[in-house]
Amino acid sequence: MTETERAYIAGLFDGEGCVSCKQVKRKRKDRGDKIYNQWYIRCEIAMTNKDIIEWVHKILGFGWSAEKRYHTKPKYKKQWRWCCGYRDAYSFAKLMWPYTQVKLHKLEQIIDHYEPEDQSHKGQNVVNLEDYRP
């Protein structure tokens, strides 16, 4: 993927995208309806242009794309979506971080979820995101 393609996808994402990084309460039926918190992490781009969504999916090489129709009336266009979740959303956040403006804070939440600041005891290298800014 070229830098131009990354910047273009980041622009699409800023304008037509959505980010979710939150904890939701779930019930476990197999454990007597015990309530627990589960992370919901997802990035998506939605628009009516199928070709652009397919191009994004092809260039990124991960996630999934699908048609999504909310209205049954013929006057409404079909909506197409590219989505990714969890570790793929983390990869996407790292790729888009240097170029996004509008959704920068939400992407940083995903990155922080997978790269907590106290990683020194785990023996992992912490990536300084400022090194990736143009």
Image: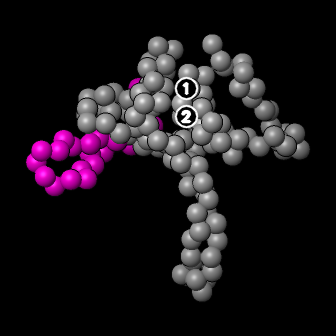
Who is closer to the viewer here, 117 or 13? 13
SS for dot 1:
loop
Q: Residue at x 89, y 44 (%)?
A: 121
Q: Is residue 113 above or below residue 16?
A: below
Residue at the spot x=77%, y=43% of the render? 116
Q: Nearer the viewer, residue 47 or 32?
A: 47
Q: Secondary structure at mark 2?
A: loop
Q: Does residue 130 appear left or right of residue 59 in this picture?
A: right
Image coordinates of residue 110 in percent, x first then y, are: 63, 42
Q: Amino acid at mark 2?
A: Lys
Q: What residue range appears in magenta? A: 59-81
- Color scheme of the displayed model: one colour
Going by the picture, which residue comes out furthest to the bottom? 32
**Rendered view: 127 above or below 69:** above
Q: Is residue 77 magenta?
A: yes
Q: Is residue 123 visible?
A: yes
- Which quarter of the figure has residue 38? bottom right
Q: Amino acid at mark 1?
A: Thr
Determine if residue 95 is in view: no
